[in-house]
Image (tube, rainbow, N blue to C red):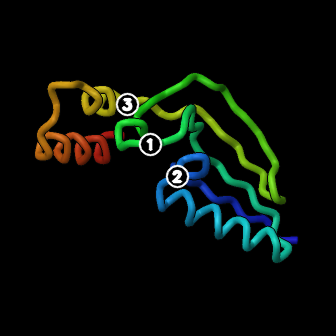
Amino acid sequence: MRKILFISYYYPPCNLTASNRVFSWAKFLAKNNFEITVLTRHWPAKIESFNDIYQHEKLGELHTINEGIKVIRVDEYNSIFKKIKQNKFVKFVGISKVISLVDIFFS
């Protein structure tokens, strides 16, 4: 049996398109005799708006096995740039894009 590791920021219970894509790949491959492990962040609540993506909850590490898929959920990396983006004063799209680019280059 071959082993596959998916590393994905988005995975259910997050209900964004990216999470469903990875889940469907993992489910399909698990049904076809692959041993699937998914490493993802812990989602503390149901994602109903864009701001819910930035909610953080201390967890440690959580392992679950469902439908033949082993899921390892870890705490999200909290960078200073995510904290700035959560700030109520940062509502301009241009500033948000600059912060995202800086985060990519320096993290």
Up-down: is 85 above or below 9? above
In x, y percent, where is residue 94?
11, 46
Which label was assigned to residue 48? Answer: 1
Closer to viewer: mark 3 or mark 2: 2
User: Relative to 97, is 4 on the left or the right?
Assistant: right
Q: Quote the CA–CA distance across marks 3 and 2.
A: 23 Å
Residue 72 in which image quadrant: top right
Of marks 2 and 1, which one's residue comes earlier in the chain?
Answer: 2
In x, y percent, where is residue 20?
57, 61
In x, y percent, where is residue 32?
82, 77
User: Relative to 74, is 33 on the left or the right?
Assistant: right
Instruction: Please state, as top left, top right, bottom left or bottom right, where the N terminus lies in the image.
Output: bottom right
Crowding at label 2, few (<14), some or many (≥20) Cα neighbours within 10 Å?
few
Q: Quote the CA–CA distance across marks 3 and 1.
A: 23 Å
Residue 28 in which image quadrant: bottom right
Depth check: give the residue in front, 32 or 6.
32
Residue at x 37%, y 30% (from the top left corner)? 79
Residue type at the position of mark 3: Ser
Up-down: is 100 above or below 34? above
Residue at x 72%, y 48% (from the top left corner)? 71
Q: Secondary structure at mark 3?
A: loop
Crowding at label 1, few (<14), some or many (≥20) Cα neighbours within 10 Å?
few
Q: Quote the CA–CA distance across marks 2 and 1.
A: 8 Å
Which residue bears the numbered disc 3?
79
Q: Secondary structure at mark 2?
A: loop
- Furthest residue toward bottom: 32
Of marks 3 and 1, which one's residue comes earlier in the chain?
Answer: 1
Label 2 near label 3: C-beta < 8 Å?
Answer: no
Which residue bears the numbered disc 2?
15
Residue type at the position of mark 1: Glu
Label 1 near label 2: C-beta < 8 Å?
Answer: no
